[in-house]
Amino acid sequence: MSAWARLEDAQMRPMGRLVRRYRTSGENLHWHITGVRKGMGTVEVTYLPSNGTLTVLVHNNRRGTWAGRAYDRLAQKIEKKLSS
């Protein structure tokens, strides 16, 4: 994900329990991928290890000029990696 973020002129930040274990519970791992320029938006990635669920999404209030299209490209890239 971090390599993809750099190619997309964005940055990846771990969130939730990856950063502050005491603030969140549960096993899910969560990242925000944000554009480096203001207004690009935020792609959110959540992984649940127990069942292998990976979710890539953009909330409507974080769509921005880039994230609204970029999340689909990331989901396709991950899906392709997993199927090969």
Image (cartoon, helix red, strand yellow):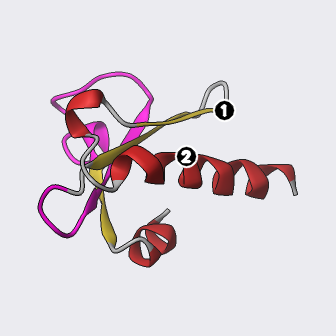
Residue occupying image coordinates x 60% and y 46%: 75
Please check the rendered image and state whether residue 38 is part of the magenta-colored stretch, yes or no: yes
Give, as a three-letter code, the residue at label 2.
Answer: Asp
Viewer-proximal residue, 5 or 22?
Answer: 5
Relative vertical location of residue 54 with respect to residue 66 in this rendering, above or below: above
Query: What is the number of callouts on the image?
Result: 2
Q: Is residue 59 visible?
A: yes
Give, as a three-letter code, the residue at label 1.
Answer: Gly
Q: Secondary structure at mark 2?
A: helix
Which residue is disc 1 drawn over? 52
Q: Which mark is residue 33?
A: none
Relative vertical location of residue 1 with respect to residue 14 in this rendering, above or below: below
Quarter holding residue 20: top left
Q: How many residues crowd mark 1 within 10 Å: few (<14), some (14–19), many (20+)?
A: few
Q: Is residue 31 visible?
A: no
Q: Residue furthest left?
A: 38
Q: Is residue 9 left or right of residue 47?
A: left
Q: Where in the figure is residue 52, as x and y percent of width and height?
A: 66, 32
Relative vertical location of residue 44 with respect to residue 82 in this rendering, above or below: above
Q: Secondary structure at mark 1?
A: loop
Residue occupying image coordinates x 40% and y 76%: 6
Please check the rendered image and state whether residue 80 is part of the magenta-colored stretch, yes or no: no
Distance from disc 2 to disc 1, alpha carbons, whole Å, reads: 19 Å
Q: Earlier in the sequence, mark 2 or mark 1?
A: 1
Q: Specify start and end residues of the magenta stretch as a single range.
A: 15-39
Quadrant including the C terminus = bottom right
Viewer-proximal residue, 37 or 27?
Answer: 37
Q: Where in the figure is residue 4, as x and y percent of width and height?
A: 50, 69
Q: Where in the figure is residue 11, as x and y percent of width and height?
A: 30, 67
Which residue is disc 2 drawn over? 72
Residue occupying image coordinates x 27% and y 57%: 34
